[in-house]
Amino acid sequence: MLKWLKNNTSTFIAILATALFLLLNFILLPRDIYWLFLLPLAGLTLLLFVMRLESGLLLMALLTPFAVDFALFPGMELSMPVEPMMVLFAAIFLFRVLQGGNYDMRIMRHPVTISVIAMLVWMLITSIFSTLPAVSFKYLAARLWFVIPFFFASVQVFRSRRRITQFVFCYAIALFVVILISTSRTLGNFHDLQTLHRVMKPFYNDHTAYGCVIALFVPVTFHYAFLQKDNRTLRLLMFILFGALIVGLFFSYSRAAWISVLAAIAVYFAIRMGIKVRWLFIIFALFVSLFFVYQSDVLYKLGKNKQDSSYDISGQVKSISNISTDASNLERLNRWASAIRMFKEKPLLGCGPGTYQFLYASYQRSYQLSVISTNSGNRGNAHSEYIGPMTEQGAPGVILITVIFLTTFATGVKVYRSAAKPENANLALALTLSLLTYYVHGVFNNFLDTDKLSVPFWAFTAAVVALDIYSEKKNQTTETKHVETSLLS
């Protein structure tokens, strides 16, 4: 402790001054002047970001699961406190890069980075031609303050595998607390499905986002709990977190989350069997093609399923394929049909990033409406990470997001098969399977416009890229040994 105080005297003084300021405010000031309490915290955050940018990244990961939406001004809602922190972090990071010019250009040349930059450039172009430019530029700004800290900055931070572990642990331990709160609310309400869908509020908007983020962390916490062998204390903690995640996933009643985890398990065995990535892509494309060829027969079979969503697990599983009476499934089909009609009007540039929810009402058809349909645009977007960009950014939009997903997946599998150190290889595979759960979940929902999913999604993507760039490869090890042998001889 004394050693830490000696090395971090200014930080300790800042923390102490902040605590005293908050205490005096609490004693002396009226309770309605709440914003004054934020000033010292904002100053302390600024100091942390300036002095220790990496620690700021971990702090945001820790706070994100607890963040809640707050209307700062009419029409402007932010996730507090993390989104203002992201803006500050992004500004400081860009200033440092422009001033120092020490950003690793290998990151900029990486295929995943090129795909991400192409996505952002295309979002800028489509925002200029947007039906609602103000909405689109706000959406683009939010995407930037997600991507800059948690992808562009994180790749360099994650050159140390220890930083990846710290990030996963920070978000997972906070998610663990949310799961405890949500599960405690679940007990005693098993027969009330509507209550079960709301127990995670205000931390997560609904059970689908809650289930999605839990599914995202299942593979990577499994890795640390069962495959990582360096630190027994970490393994024990991750084992506890993994158990909590499984409980949370079960009680999330999110069918898409369950499917995504099962898909990750199937792909895991396929990769362990040595199946090449291109064959996985071909098999996936074949299944999609078969669906479109036989879609009439498939939809007829699905239409005969009358099982609605249920608190009963078997009923909930059966309701996955119910497109005749299940309100959630019917509304999703309604959103997709509206999105496709919008896409046909503007197939190249789309209607503009973030504008779908404000425009789709007039594209609905009465025969496709469900009991939860609305014309006010207050119940989310296109419910697909593929159809949404297609509608808002045209055909290039869906192509670019798909390229990011496929390139990241291929990179992760490549690192798994080429890394010289098994711990790097196994971590790359775990992160890739975690991301795969989102790729699958993205068929049914899209959450990359929220901090809750964007933070771990872009951070995991950055970690895969970092492992690819900075991990020693097997062939490199062999070549190095050959050179050393030649020199010695």
Image (cartoon, helix red, strand yellow):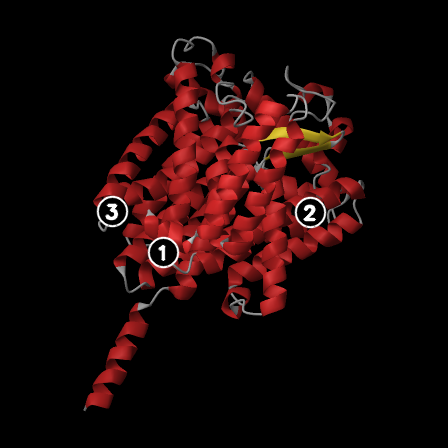
How far apart, in angstroms, are the residues tagged by discs 2 and 3? 39 Å
Going by the image, does 229 lie left or right of 191?
left
Could you say whether the residue bearing mark 3 is in a helix, strand or loop? helix
Going by the image, does 85 lie left or right of 298?
right
Could you say whether the residue bearing mark 2 is in a helix, strand or loop? helix
Q: Please identify, in this view, whether the residue under mark 1 or under mark 3 is nearer the observer.
A: 1
> What residue sits right under mark 2 in the picture?
140
Residue type at mark 1: give it. Arg
Residue type at mark 2: give it. Leu
* Residue 413, image x, y percentages: 38, 56
Query: Which dot marks residue 146?
Result: none
Above/below status of 342 relative to 193: below
Among the two numbered marks 1 and 2 on one chain, the one whose residue lies closer to the N terminus: 2
Q: Residue at x 49, y 42 (%)?
A: 15
Q: Residue at x 55, y 65 (%)?
A: 108
Going by the image, does 244 lie left or right of 71?
left
Q: Residue at x 33, y 67 (%)?
A: 472
Among the two numbered marks 1 and 3 on one chain, the one whose residue lies closer to the N terminus: 1
Marks 1 and 2: CB-CB under 8 Å?
no
How far apart, in angstroms, are the residues tagged by discs 1 and 2? 31 Å
Query: Which dot marks residue 161?
Result: 1
Which sits in the foreground, 342 or 142? 142
Rendered image quadrant of residue 378: top right
Going by the image, does 224 lie left or right of 299?
left
> What residue sits right under mark 3 in the picture?
227
Q: Please identify, in this view, whether the residue under mark 1 or under mark 2 is nearer the observer.
A: 1
Could you say whether the residue bearing mark 1 is in a helix, strand or loop? helix
Residue type at mark 3: give it. Leu
- Residue 253 visible to the viewer: yes
